[in-house]
Image (cartoon, rainbow, N blue to C red):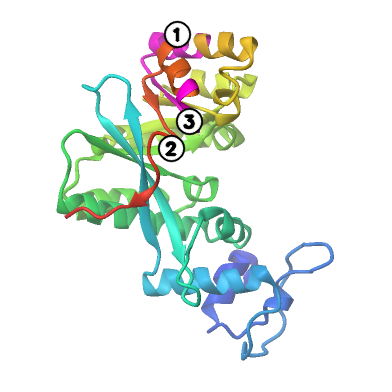
Amino acid sequence: MSTLANRSLAEHYLSVGRTASLESLFETDAGMMFTATSTEALTTPPPTPDGRTLQKISKALEQDLFFLYYQSIRPIDQGSKAIREVLVRLPDEKTGQIRLPRTFLPTAARFGLMYEIDFWVVRRCFQEIEKTELANTIYSINLSRQTIHHHGFVDFIEHIVKEFSVDPSHICFEITEADMCLDLQATTKILLHLRDLGFCLALDRFDWKLSAFVALRQFPFSYLKVDGSLISKITSDKGVLATLSLVTRLGQEMGMQTIASHVSSSAIAEAASNLNFDYLQGFIISEPRPLVLL
């Protein structure tokens, strides 16, 4: 078995039959992870919220328990393709409630499991789309930085493309501006490969910072999703209004379609439409619902 130095703590923990104590996986005071040394069996629930969540994530991955939801992104021009952003949910077996991503993804990221969840989402999404591929619909899947830079990511995507009869142009991969700029050269190389395979690509959480323009200059995205922190001020801040007007013009000039995210009122939706955004997204537009294609 590989040494812990060559593997993530989560991979090590999950590979030894769940025998390592969660308390030994991280220091509660400093919050710093270190080598697990205890072999005490987990006969009782882990003592920390992180530990309990890690167990639920592990079980969901092993037993295929995650759910896929989607949120519709409405085109302003009714002739444009519809977009569905794919979302992941985790059921709570005790309460029957559906857990939102913010309640478990931070733990997954901390323990290096984001790529496993992303891989699961991609595979399941392809399975569902293959059942009934909607000709005028694009499914948008978020990719974490752990996934983008995972050594097996490109091979996994190439295998998925061969395994399922799904047109890659019906899939859009989203990457945040922050993750894009973390390692521009390496990320650009991966995104170019995805584009060559036929996938659409979107830059998420565009917020008018200099790094965002660096990302745009580095790679020609199909979609530009503007951060909700800007969209929320579209009706109250003239400076933001002027900025967003420039964003939509920039998108048009660079051949990208713009998406106003986190639209929370009819006034904001109207203002975004008047600024020539191509798409609107938010709970007032469409609430998340299960992704079940019959």
Instruction: Find residue 260 and report its horizontal and vertical position in percent.
Output: 46, 25
Q: Nearer the viewer, residue 145 or 171?
A: 171
Residue located at (41% from left, 50% from top) = 87
Alpha-carbon span between mark 1 and mark 3: 17 Å
Cβ atoms at labels 1 and 3 below 8 Å apart: no
Q: Is residue 149 left or right of residue 28?
A: left
Residue located at (46% from left, 11% from top) = 250
Up/down of 293 relative to 184, above or below: below
What type is the residue that disc 1 sits on?
Arg
What type is the residue that disc 3 sits on?
Ser
Sequence-first tag of 1 and 3: 1
Residue 88's disc number: none
* Residue at the extreme front: 266
Instruction: Find residue 159 and report its horizontal and vertical position in percent.
Output: 28, 53
Instruction: Find residue 43 and report its horizontal and vertical position in percent.
Output: 61, 91
Q: Which residue is mark 3?
A: 261
Instruction: Find residue 240 and report its horizontal and vertical position in percent.
Output: 61, 15
Q: Nearer the viewer, mark 1 or mark 3?
A: 3
Q: Which residue is mark 1?
A: 249
- Does the magenta-highlighted stretch encompass residue 263? yes
Q: Which residue is mark 2?
A: 174
Q: Is residue 291 left or right of residue 287?
A: left
